[in-house]
Structure formats: structure tokens, C-alpha cells
Image (tube, rainbow, N blue to C red):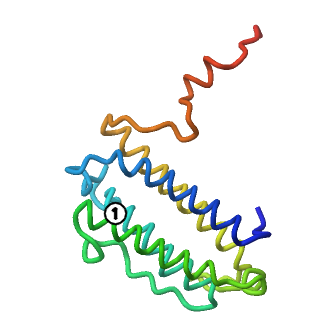
């Protein structure tokens, strides 16, 4: 996907974030700090990470600036309500930055925190992939806790199977 029109990308990005928020709403409030293993991200860590990385890495880098990623710890936001507010606030700030990008900026090279030059629109595409990766973690964690989650695109795998034509092999 090349970003041909910034407004379409921003609408797409908003849809991606809404899907993440829909599954985040399933996190039991008393499990926000739960992690599947010592040293692994908790639900709260994942959500703080998504907000901080969007704003302080991706949004900075596409402007030609260095990353200012502050980490994902509770000093950024603690407790379910604060974590979700932080995620929303970081997203709003990042979208404001993305909205101001020119076509020239989208086509220009920016530099990743690893020091690798990449076309800015490709870096934004990587941001989408990053979000989806961490959303998958949330789904997996919730599955481990036996928490029901909404189907990603309206149907469960079982419902897709039921609605499919079954041909003999």
C-alpha cells in the first residue's frame, strides 16, 4: 500500500485504531497489569507502548526528527482509565502531525531509530503493521484468560466456515 492520499490513509489508520480499541475494551479492569510471563508486556504496557511509539517514534521520524520514545512504563499512565486516556491523547497528537505532512514529506526519506533510511510513507505503513502485531498480542492474552473477544471483521472463523460452500474433496 502506497499512501497516495493522506486523507485516505488517516481514515484507514483511524479504522485500525478503532479495532484495537474494540478489543482493548474487553480487557478486564483488574487484569490491566497482568502479563503472561515475567518480563513480558502487560495489557497496560502494550497500550502505553502503542501510544508512545506512535507519537514519539513514528510521528517524530516522519517529520525528519529523531525518536523520543519514552518507554512503556506506568510513569506514563497508571490504571485502566489513565492508560486509555494516554493512548487516545498520543493518537490525537500523532494524527495532528500526520495530517500536516506534505506530499514531499511523505515521499522523502526519514531515518528509523536503527539508523536506516526509509521513505516516510513506508514508515507509516510499518506503523500499521506494528499496531496489528500488538493487537494480536492482546487477543492472545485475552484468549489465555478465557475472555470473549469481538470477531475482527464481524464473523468468527466458525461462522465463516458455516457460511461457506463445502465441496467434497
Residue sitting at x 43%, y 74%: 90
| Place of residue 5 in the rendered image (x, y in percent of width and height, measured from the top left) | 76, 70
Residue 81 falls left or right of residue 46: left
Q: Position of residue 14 (x, y in %)?
A: 56, 61
Kindly indicate the quadrant of the structure image that contains residue 165.
top right
Relative side of 6 to 38, left or right: right
Of all residues, the one furthest to the left in this rendering is: 30
Percent position of residue 1, x then y: 76, 61
Q: Can you say whether 59 is above or below 5 in the image?
A: below
Q: Nearer the viewer, residue 91 or 32?
A: 91
The answer to whether 52 is drawn above or below residue 20 in the figure is: below
Q: Position of residue 168 (x, y in %)?
A: 76, 8
Could you tell me which secondary element the residue under label 1 belongs to? Answer: helix
Q: Which residue is mark 1?
A: 84
Residue drawn 34% across the image and 63% down it: 84
Label 1 crowding class (10 Å Cα cut-off): few <14, some 14-19, many 20+?
A: many
Q: Which residue is rendered at x = 62% and y = 88% of the image?
A: 63
Amino acid at each position: 500500500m502506497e499512501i497516495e492520499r493522506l486523507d485516505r490513509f488517516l481514515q484507514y489508520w483511524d479504522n485500525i485504531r478503532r479495532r484495537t480499541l474494540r478489543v482493548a475494551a474487553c480487557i478486564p479492569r483488574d487484569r490491566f497489569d497482568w502479563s503472561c510471563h515475567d518480563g513480558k508486556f502487560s495489557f497496560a504496557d502494550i497500550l502505553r507502548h502503542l501510544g508512545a511509539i506512535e507519537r514519539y517514534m513514528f510521528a517524530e521520524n516522519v517529520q525528519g526528527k529523531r525518536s523520543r520514545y519514552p518507554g512503556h512504563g506506568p510513569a506514563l499512565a497508571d490504571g485502566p482509565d489513565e492508560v486509555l486516556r494516554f493512548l487516545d491523547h498520543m493518537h490525537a497528537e500523532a494524527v495532528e502531525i500526520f495530517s500536516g505532512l506534505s506530499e514531499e514529506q511523505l515521499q522523502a526519506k526519514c531515518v528509523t531509530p536503527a539508523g536506516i533510511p526509509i521513505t516516510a510513507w513506508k514508515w507509516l505503513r510499518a506503523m500499521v503493521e506494528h499496531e496489528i502485531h500488538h493487537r494480536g498480542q492482546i487477543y492472545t492474552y485475552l484468549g489465555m484468560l478465557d475472555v470473549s473477544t469481538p470477531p475482527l471483521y464481524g464473523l468468527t472463523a466458525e461462522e465463516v466456515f458455516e457460511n461457506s460452500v463445502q465441496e467434497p474433496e
